[in-house]
Amino acid sequence: MKKKSENNWLIVLFFILLSLLFIYPMLYVVSVSLSFDGDIAKYGYQLIPKRITFMAYSYIFQTPKALIQSYMVTIFVTVVGTLLSLILTSSLAYIMTRKDYRYSRITGYFVFFTLLFNAGLVPSYIVMTTVLHLQDTVWALILPYGVSAWFTMLMKGFMDGLPFEIIESAKIDGSSELSTFVRIVLPLSKPALATVGLFYALAYWNDWWLAMLYIQNEKLIPLQYYLQRIMSNIEFLTKNMQAGISVDMSTIPAESSRMGIAILAAGPMLFAFPFFQKYLIKGLTVGAVKG
């Protein structure tokens, strides 16, 4: 019994050390974002800043209205996009698991086929702009990520583990297909929904590529693209200074702003992750085994 207790302490100690290794880089990022660029150039990255300054955040928040607006756009896209993607993905995965559906195997083949081949950027752009006319609309930031073939296969792997007898008994009791799916299948698939939902949310939150392609309206600029443009402006000014053009870089905290942007971009999702953690491992393992 004593040996077992010692083993438990060793396991706990191991995971504490492992957690510190993950937290350590994040502390470095926070520290650098609060440092003067001159101190960074002189002493390098340090866990404890020589002098604390909020110059980087002051530079990023020079236009607070635009930053808040980009946050609102990203939150809307993430919430609506994740919900829509979960509905589409779970519906597609469900019909692929129904053994009494004649085209379930063909549907699964087409989904798997898209994992191997895609049309490419040019046809996608033409469809989005010329056929669907979605440029400069919020749907251009949502619909391209609406259904992921990989997440659909992951969801299918989980739903394959649900007893088919439950669906048959629901049909005998007079339940419609929609009612069976909403009231029985979805509640039993909470671990998979949470896992896939987290992945979709991360994809929507971190995306700036779609905004660069389809968005020109300043009111629809998402957070990641807004921060990426700030970073591009800093790099442009730095190159101009190196080329001999007179630019006062003392008022532009280039290095610390990079870290400040990383915190603003990743911070909200870091706080959201623990709420999904209890479902994440179960959803991944069950989906992987059954897939």
Image (cartoon, helix red, strand yellow):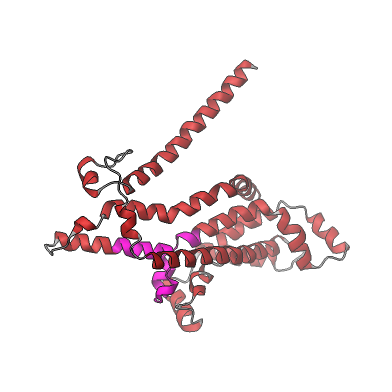
The residue shown at (61%, 49%) is 288
Q: Depth check: 160 or 187 in front?
A: 187
Residue 57 x, y percent position in the rendering = 34, 55
The residue shown at (29%, 53%) is 55
Residue 3 x, y percent position in the rendering = 60, 17
In the rendered image, is residue 252 in sight? yes
The residue shown at (48%, 70%) is 141
Q: Give left or right: position of 48 versus 149.
A: left
Is 266 above or below relative to 208? above
Q: Give left or right: position of 14 versus 66.
A: right
The residue shown at (17%, 60%) is 248
Residue 34 x, y percent position in the rendering = 32, 47
Picture quadrant where residue 111 is located = bottom right
Residue 35 x, y percent position in the rendering = 29, 46
Which residue is outermost to the top? 2
Q: Give left or right: position of 212 versus 282.
A: left
Q: Depth check: 103 or 170 in front?
A: 170
Q: How many marks?
A: 0
Which residue is outermost to the left? 244
The magenta stretch is 203-232
Picture quadrant where residue 1 is located = top right
Q: Depth check: 32 or 85 in front?
A: 32
- Magenta span has 189? no
In the rendered image, is residue 291 in sight? no
- Magenta span has 215? yes
Dominant secondary structure, magenta? helix
